[in-house]
Amino acid sequence: MQYKYIAQFAREKINPGLFYRSVKRWRDQYAIFFNENKYLNISLMQQDPLCFFTDKDIIEWGSAPELAMMDQHLKRAKLDKISISDKDRIIILQFSKPDPFQGRQQLDLILELIPQFGNIILVRHENEKPIIIDCAKKISLAENRQRQLLPAVEYEPPPAGFVNDKSEITFPLSFTDNMQVIEEAEAGFQNINELLEAVYYEGWLQKLSDQNLRSQRKILYNKKKKKTAKLLKLKAELDDAEKQTKWLQMGELLKANIQQVKPGSDQISLINYYDPAMAKITIDLQPEKSMQWNINHYFKKYRKAKTGKLMISEQIKLTENEIAELDKTMKEIEEINLLLPGEKLQHVSGKNSVSDNITRLIIDDNWIFLIGRNSTENDLITTRIAQSQDWWFHTRIYKGTHVVLRNFKKQELPEHLLRLGCRLAAYFSKAGKSTNVPVDYTQIRHVRKPRGSAPGYVIYTDQKTLYVDPMSLRDAREEITDWQK
């Protein structure tokens, strides 16, 4: 953002007397919360750092442990003044708070809104020198020879080298798709704070959402590609397993005609006594191996095919369901608002996301159980994956996991799935070895995560309670197999 627009933000009269409440973080964005439900959104994105005041409840902010000292020192501090450095895009927020020794203590919150080097720094004044209390990005001399940003070190602004644009701004203002500010627009904003707010929410966040959408598509495409390759391999193995009778016959024929095989032969033709027509059959051999090895080889293929056929069939069905789920997700992803909650964007990368590790229990194309095994997974399946028509299970008294039953066709909850969901929730809880465990269940639309609450914590309404005995995941799979017979 150009200097003159940041300078105009500092000059505009913001509601004075705001008292500091807390600092929160989402990715490289920070929020300084004040009273009156207002906060200062500070974006340290590398391309175009900016800040603005807003009261919009769009991003799900989390804690900022790297600014714990800053949070502690600014408690009960009042925002007195906002100014900007003459040298660069550096906003200075002057706070004051009661001091039992000096009357009032002044603290400066410095926002370095410089592309590639954005930072938030809190300083106090000792002997007319600004001493750093805390900063978002701590830098030592080993990382930067020009200056260091560490607690208890004197603050030095970044080296000058920026030419300030102090020309007059002509309102109204608007912005392009590339987030470049347009002056004297036909219709636009009459103050800079509203412009910066729109650039952030309608421009940058939307662009980030589009990038995230493309990343999600790529991740899903790669997953489907791997699953499809796995399915082809499994079908080839199943085709091989279905030849189990053939492998047995070959082993028995070789065993009965062991004397006829010449050493070093790569195949032999024998009369197939198992064929009513008594036709000849050609059996491939490993010439470098002994005859006994070749006989054992075919018997081993028979045993493997006999025991593996059922397992391979189950794996094929599971893989086909996973591919179908990926196809469904790829269709639905266009309708999902990937911006909300904000944490969704944190998991987008070329690597496996947290959702890859979620335990799944597939019933059929209409129903799938998701089981969280920790607070992060509980948050993921309850607040981000589950939809309003899905069902949610959790033990009433005991601590435990979240169990979600995806309801893809928006059907009524069958009694057997209701009981299974409750029994799984009971098993994955502190009451996993008890009996007659109370489990609450309700639809996801009645489950809500309070703002700022700990991971895995939710509140819910319209629930009913069922008393059940716990059931392990293995027993649940066996029960599902019995249902499908």
Image: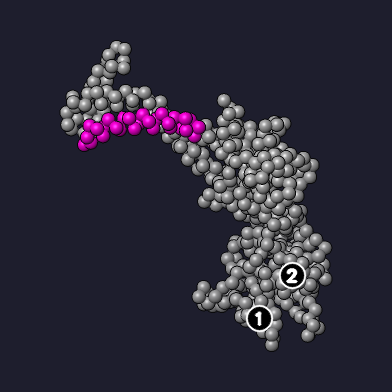
Task: Name the amino acid type tagged 2.
Answer: Ala
Is residue 442 visible in the rendered image? The answer is no
**In the image: residue 321, left or right of residue 282:** right
The span from disc 1 to disc 2 (Cα, nearest Å) is 23 Å
Camera-near label (1 vs 2) is 1
Read off the residue under disc 1: 131
Residue at 32% across, 23% down: 249
Task: Name the amino acid type tagged 1.
Answer: Ile
Report the number of discs: 2
SS assignment at label 2:
helix
**Does the stretch in magenta take in 304?**
yes
Which label was assigned to residue 10?
2
Residue at 71% across, 37% down: 389
In the picture, the quarter occupied by the N terminus is bottom right
The picture places residue 485, in percent across and down from the top left corner, at 57, 25
SS assignment at label 1:
strand
Residues shaded magenta: 288-316
Depth order, front residue of 203/63: 63
Q: Main secondary structure of the magenta part?
A: helix
Comes first in the chain, label 1 or label 2? 2
